[in-house]
Image (cartoon, rainbow, N blue to C red):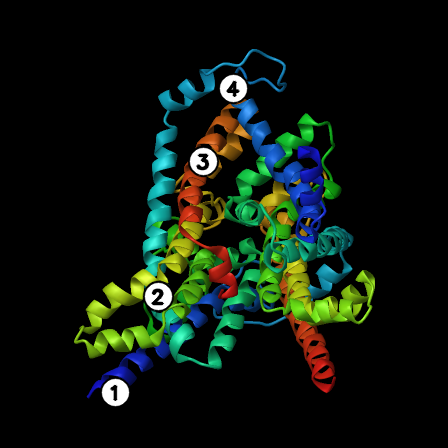
Amino acid sequence: MKSRRFSVSRTLIVLWTAAIVVFLYIPIVSVVVASFSHKRYFSFPVTKWTTKWYEKAMASLSVRDLIETSLEVAVLVTIFSVVLAFFGALAFARYDWKGRKFYQKIILLPIFFPQAVLGLALLLWFSAIGVTTSWHTAVFAHMVWIVPIVTLIMSIQVYSFDPSLEEAAYDLGATRWQVLREITLPILSPGILSGTIFAFLLSWGNFPLSLFTTGADQTVPEWLYAKMVSGYTPMVPTLGSLTVGSAVIMLVLAYLVYSVIRRRTLKE
Amino acid sequence: MRRRRFFTWLRQPGVLSAMPATLFLTVGFIGPLVMVFAYSFMPPRTFSLAQAPTLDNYFAVIHESYYISFLWSVWLASLTVALLLLICYPIAYGMAKLFGKWANLVTILVAVPLLISENIRLFGWVLFLLKKGILDGTMQAFFGIEMPSLLYGVPVIVLGLVYVYLPFMLFPLVIGISMVSDTLKEAASDLGASRWQIFREVELPLAMPGVLIGAMLTFILALGSLAEAKILGGQAVIMLADDIESAFTFAQNWPRGSVLSVLMIVFSGGLIFFLFRRIDLDRLLGGR
């Protein structure tokens, strides 16, 4: 009797989970569908499918500019954040030191902070210290939010890291640099990889921080928002779909890299 | 002597590796917050900090109708948290206890949308719910039912908030529920506790850190949200973040915007302080 009731509630939970996952993908599928619709103003069912908006987007110089700015910001944010967060995560989870509990809470604070307000505070800060906003300042702004997130992601991996491996290497006469290169980095590489993905894609898709800190420059999410609010063009779903596509490609690549790493470590 | 002690503390590998990120956040996070706080005491519509401090802005904010947007934000954020708890608890339970290997798949499926810009996903809802959009179009084509207008109102803002912040509730809940040991629940059951009693007396208290983190995180993020009300709500409701933005931009009144930001920071900061006193991050994240 008990086990039957158990299996009924189990089925319900599975169905509910499936429904919510579908719910999460409704808007994403909607954007992709709209990007292939022929009409200037979207209506459903789609009467004629087309790829002309993609051709137009590819040919447009302003779209190329937007993508270039977004890429520049995201690449720089990723490089700086991953380096800062790697050491930040070691301090978070690997070493024991006085002040660590306090540090853990301070470092996570920006995640718990409304991004729009953070963006405005940064705008105020930049103009008060006399820095003109451009995509360079957006890199800085993104990092304030992304460094803590990447630190958190990497920390989870660092917690499961066995410090005695490093100690053994030191005992065998390895230098600090050798230990970092041969032991610490390879073992933590899955955490570093997922941190990199998150850093890149969160910066690539960020809107509230960019809105206030890019100055005269514009990123893809900013442009999309401007067009959604006024002056709709069918390029909105098209560029939206392109960013969805690039996110999916990144994730697939990351998965491939991850499985190569894992196969190599298993061999050793 | 004390200086020497400071330097030995400083030379620890933990302190050294904490240094870059800490310095960066001091400049990039603490600095701007102090600046906002300082501006909130400057005379209205001024752009420099070189004036005698005043409380005028605080009085002005209390006397004007800002409490409306503040109350709307608090109410919508609370509603979002309540709905998310109901929606996510069964899923989190399934991911922590029932799904086994499949839990990883669910994690990936829930995390992937996070990597797509929030306003693209919200715009997807517009396309779905629009008149002649995907929902309305399907209903008309297959069932001949015309849907009433679903966009631009309070319910659709709540939908947007629930949609955007769902992962931020789900993942902490999963961590929380996986901390509940099954042997304890079996023991309670052997002692004759009913299912409801086990849930209330054993499972929920043990999963509390995860529940608290999820609830706080989603509450604070929803409280400061901007895009949901703008893209889906069509300005049916003005949220607090919206007021802050227009004070800084259209109205060019930095001290006014600063006061509103300080109110939001103090309110959310109080909640975070309460939260951080009650949880141990090492145990939660590292299982120590």
* Residue at mark 1: chain: A
* Label 3 in the same subunit as label 4: yes
In contact (CB < 8 Å): disc 3 and disc 4: no
In contact (CB < 8 Å): disc 2 and disc 4: no
- The single residue placed furthest to the top in the displayed view is B52
Q: Which mark is residue B264?
A: 3
* Residue at mark 2: chain: B
Q: Which mark is residue B89?
A: 2
* For residue B282, above or below residue B22: below
The quadrant in which the N terminus of chain B is found is top right
Q: Nearer the viewer, residue B120 or A231?
A: B120
* N-term-proximal mark, 3 vs 2: 2
Secondary structure beneath dot 1 equals helix
Q: Residues within 10 Å of mark 4 (few under 14, many from 20)?
A: many
The answer for how far apart the CA atoms under marks 1 and 2 are is 21 Å
* Label 3 in the same subunit as label 2: yes
Secondary structure beneath dot 3 equals helix
* Foreground disc of the pair 4, 1: 1
Position in image of residue B270 (x %, y %): 41, 39
Q: Residue at x 34, y 76 (%)?
A: B182
* For residue A72, above or below residue A48: above
* Residue at mark 3: chain: B
Quadrant in the picture for residue A138: top right
Q: Nearer the viewer, residue B263 or B19?
A: B19
Q: Is residue A240 visible?
A: yes
Q: Label 4: which residue?
A: B41
Q: Residues within 10 Å of mark 1 (few under 14, many from 20)?
A: few
The answer for how far apart the CA atoms under marks 4 and 1 are is 65 Å
In contact (CB < 8 Å): disc 3 and disc 2: no
Secondary structure beneath dot 2 equals helix
Q: Label 1: which residue?
A: A3
Instruction: Please state which amino acid type lies under the numbered disc 3.
Output: Met
